[in-house]
Amino acid sequence: MNRGVLLMETPYSDSDFKIEWEKISNIKSTTTFLITISNGERYNSVLRTTEEGSISIFSENGIFRKLHNDIVYLNSIDPGF
């Protein structure tokens, strides 16, 4: 994600999908991401939307719940790196 636009690539399409971050209502990942929060906190984690609409970040140090708009950067990473 860069400047509020999430770029998603799929194995079945030649071109990537661009999605405005603020318009995403639900997310669930199995991919590990480098996540940056608006206050500067960083996590290496998977993401999941909660029933309340916040986003759970599952990191080595616990589960953190953040508001959708608090997430300012996402980039997929190789967890074995």
Image (cartoon, helix red, strand yellow):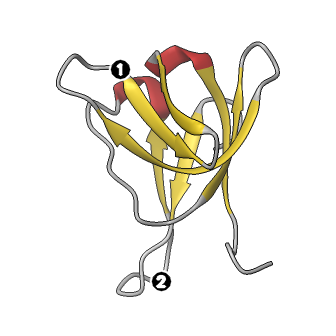
Q: Nearer the viewer, residue 37 or 69?
A: 37
Gap in angstroms between the C-alphas marked 2 and 1:
32 Å
Q: Nearer the viewer, residue 18 or 76?
A: 76
Tell me which corner region of the image, top left, top right, bottom left or bottom right, holds residue 50: top left
Q: Residue at x 35, y 20 (%)?
A: 54
Q: Which mark is residue 78?
A: none
Q: Nearer the viewer, mark 2 or mark 1?
A: 1
Q: Residue at x 35, y 27 (%)?
A: 23
User: Residue 56 appears at what percent x and percent y?
Assistant: 41, 33
Q: Amino acid at mark 1?
A: Ser
Q: Amino acid at mark 2?
A: Asp
Mark 2, residues whose alpha carbon is within 10 Å: few (<14), some, or many (≥20)?
A: few
Q: Residue under circle 1?
A: 54
Q: Residue under circle 2?
A: 14
On-image quarter of the C terminus = bottom right
User: Residue 79 appears at what percent x and percent y?
Assistant: 67, 72
The relative height of residue 59 versus residue 70 in the rendered view (above or below) is: below
Q: Residue furthest front?
A: 61
User: Residue 78 appears at what percent x and percent y?
Assistant: 69, 75
Q: Nearer the viewer, residue 55 or 73?
A: 55
Q: Residue at x 35, y 86 (%)?
A: 12
Q: Is residue 9 left or right of residue 53?
A: right
The relative height of residue 71 versus residue 16 in the rendered view (above or below) is: above
Q: Residue at x 57, y 61 (%)?
A: 32
The relative height of residue 27 versus residue 53 in the rendered view (above or below) is: below
Whether residues under marks 2 and 1 lie with C-beta atoms below 8 angstroms apart, the answer is no
Q: Is residue 31 left or right of residue 43?
A: left
